[in-house]
Image (cartoon, grey):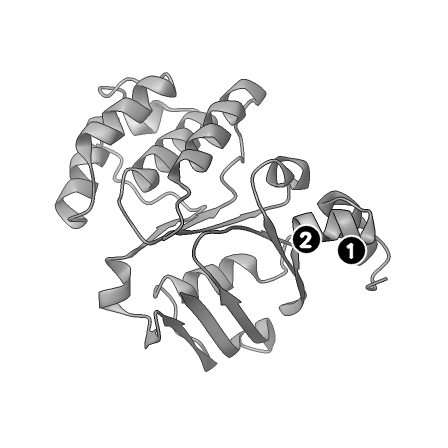
Amino acid sequence: MLESKNLTRKFGSKTAVDGVTLSLKPGHIYAMLGPNGSGKTTWMKMAAGLMKPTSGEVTFQGEPVGIASREQVAYMSTEPYFYAWMSIRDAGKYYEDFFADFSMSRFKDLLTRMDLEEDLKIRTLSSGMVAKMKIALTLSRDAKVYMLDEPFNGIDLLARDEIRTTILEAAREDKLLLLSSHLVEEMEAIADQAVFIRNGKLIEVRDLEELRETDGVSMADRYRMIFGHGEVN
């Protein structure tokens, strides 16, 4: 469904994504894992059609990503992207205007579950409340692909449980979920596939059930093997 071939993105002399060839299929929840600066966010922005690659390509259902794919790909960035005057209700209306697949009733339901009030001004929200609102907005779309960049940042333990449940509810056989995070233990409870990336290069993609049965290690263990010692064991 979502594929990159020799995808590269440079910023001056720095290579953020370095020749990544990766194929992601529907019916799975992928965890994209790596230390800060690994290239996770840059790859996701190119896959969302928000950043052009220096070389290589990324396709959605066989076609280059662009305006058409944005109607099917719901991307949640780490950066703030709301106007200062907006309330949570305004943010919902903003999404409703931009995305035909956005469900206002679904959004209101998620707000209730996440203990957020519609009339709250976004500028007054804590970082954790903003994170919950962004997740509610993203998952209120009926997209084919959901990409959440660091969905658990700034969120307390109890709220993480609700968000984890919400993410799992969004999973379908015809949908693809990709989450990037440095909170590996949180990802292990959600994902069934792990994408390990370091210094802009793809290290490996592993099926987590196979990893546990064949290698006898968890995703967190594998993460430590790859990134803790600087080499793949």
Residue placed at 36% from the left, 37% from the top? Answer: 134
Residue placed at 27% from the left, 20% from the top? Answer: 120
Q: Residues within 10 Å of mark 1 (few under 14, many from 20)?
A: some
Q: Residues within 10 Å of mark 2 (few under 14, many from 20)?
A: some
Residue under numbered circle 2:
35
Q: Is residue 197 visible?
A: no
Image spot of residue 113 (x, y percent) = 36, 19
Image spot of residue 216 (x, y percent) = 82, 47
- Choose top left, top right, bottom left or bottom right for residue 191: top right
Image spot of residue 56 (x, y percent) = 47, 82
- Dot 1 and dot 2 residues touching (CB under 8 Å): yes
Q: Is residue 202 left or right of residue 5?
A: right
Q: Is residue 83 visible?
A: yes
Q: Earlier in the sequence, mark 1 or mark 2?
A: 2
Mark sitting on residue 129:
none
3D distance between C-alphas at marks 1 and 2:
8 Å
Residue placed at 31% from the left, 18% from the top? Answer: 112
